[in-house]
Image (spheres, rainbow, N blue to C red):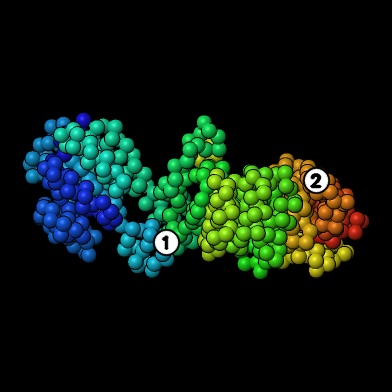
Amino acid sequence: MSHPVRRALLSVSDKTGLIAFARRLSALGIELISTGGTAKALAEAGLSVVEVSSITGFPEIMDGRVKTLHPAIHGGLLGVLDNAGHSAAMTAHGIRPIGLLVVNLYPFEATMARGASWEDTVENIDVGGPAMIRAAAKNHDDVTVIVDPADYDAVADELAAHDNATAKDTRRRLAAKAFARTASYDAAISQWFGAQSGDLLGTYFATGGTKLQALRYGENPHQKAAFYLSPGKRFGIAAARQLQGKELSYNNINDTDAALECLAEFAHQDEAACVIVKHANPCGVAIAADPANAYRKALACDPVSAFGGIIALNRPLDAVTAMQITELFTEVIIAPYADEEAQAIIARKKNLRLLVLEDAALSGSGLSVKTVGGGFLVQTRDAMSVADMDLRVVTKRQPTPTELADLRFAFRVAKHVKSNAIVYARAGATVGIGAGQTSRVDSARIAARKNEDAARGAGLAEPSIRGSVVASDAFFPFPDGLLQAAEAGATAVIQPGGSLKDDDVIRAADENGLAMVFTGVRHFRH
């Protein structure tokens, strides 16, 4: 156990649980030291509190920017009590130990998230708080540091049970949490400054977040996992609200994120859009006049893969659509809204997770971070849309208006399919998706075969891939992939272009009567 705590310094922005915790400390005979608004709140609650200024002999100045940055405070936090030299210095300078520090920081992240002015955001950068937290955490052998109101009760219980002392394991755990908090705080600040200055990828890169949810396990049961919120305005899966169903798993979150990324391509579509995802890959995407028809068309692409998948809609979930979805085992449904009748239908499947997410929070800007051995890769998000591309017809035959609409649709979807990606589409719906293959030819074959299987299962006289268009996320390096698509029944092609063999590919398209469009933009997704 530590030396008994005789004095506690409390300086908090978030005053949740503060008064109740301070009362427990006071009841244990612990002297309360505080600053500004915290001291006022404690005094108004009838607690005896010593102002920091009376200890430092110096008033709070510069609008409170300078108040705790003083040897009388930092000496009390950093002094090692069993070190004779430290003890002598403390005695010589009249510094008394501070055994408990309770600090949470100025609300920089919340200020940034609401889009406050430059001046207001900068003013909410805490300086004294992180300095004290780091000092106390470094000296955790003698100081207990709390940065989260969730730890108040456990620390108070431990102090009460052990004559105002805490265990070494407790202090180390809280010190780790304290350093993580200041690191996350500084990461938010550095990323905000980077975004304001346009230097997102500087010499040093910091990232951090706040735990939103402890997960039962990661991708597999033997892996540990948690879900963290990035600083800033919430969007995507982090902004979703769960209405019912089992707790979201690591894979649920990852797959739902993939579905929302693809759905964002159709956020402003006049028609309803449905995205079905399995193992982070779209296995069916469609647009239609209403959600029920969009779901039906998306499901028809690959009903086998859709089993146990994620359903994302850009329109409110109604009873008709809910009834159709519940006919197949589904892990997650996410939509902007679900009416009462739809919720009642989904409730019959108690484990089915139903989430709602407003359109405005569907997607956001920012950076993508991927860990690799010994480090991590950071890049800006792929925000390029086919709507912003200068499409160039490179074949003798021009695509028809219907083909062009489907080509644009297919390329939107291909952006979200793992490379090598091949997407066949027809009438505003995917009819075959080949994902994640080491050969583009194999992706084209797999997509065609899946369509044939789906047609056979639906009792169709002819596979719907006949008369479709095809999108490739990257260029065809040789004519073989394009010829495979032509053999499957595609009539038009959209691809980035840029291969050394482009002329050969164009010639093959002309020889097979295909219309082909170059986008000039690649959409690798690994």
On residue 484, the disc is none
Please tell me whether mark 1 sits on a helix, a strand or a loop: helix
Left or right of 148 in this view: 511: right
Front residue of this view, candidates 179 and 27 = 27
Callout 2–callout 1 Cβ contact below 8 Å: no
Residue 367: percent from the left, percent from the top?
Answer: 52, 54
- What's the amino acid at mark 1? Ala
Q: Residue at x 87, y 52 (%)?
A: 462
Decide: few, some or many residues near mark 1? Use Cα within 10 Å; few <14, some 14-19, many ≥20.
Answer: few
Task: Please determine whether, in this image, residue 328 is positioned above or below residue 83.
Answer: below
Q: How far, Cα to Cα, is label 2 from label 1?
A: 49 Å
Residue 169: percent from the left, percent from the top?
Answer: 29, 32
Task: Please determine whether, in this image, residue 339 is positioned above or below residue 301.
Answer: below
For label 1, the residue is: 113
Mark 2 or 1: in front is 2
Left or right of 23 in this view: 422: right
For label 2, the residue is: 457
Residue 495: percent from the left, percent from the top?
Answer: 76, 56
Residue 78: percent from the left, percent from the top?
Answer: 20, 41
Q: Earlier in the sequence, mark 2 or mark 1?
A: 1
Residue 69, visible in the rendered structure: no
**Location of residue 334 by image quarter:** bottom right
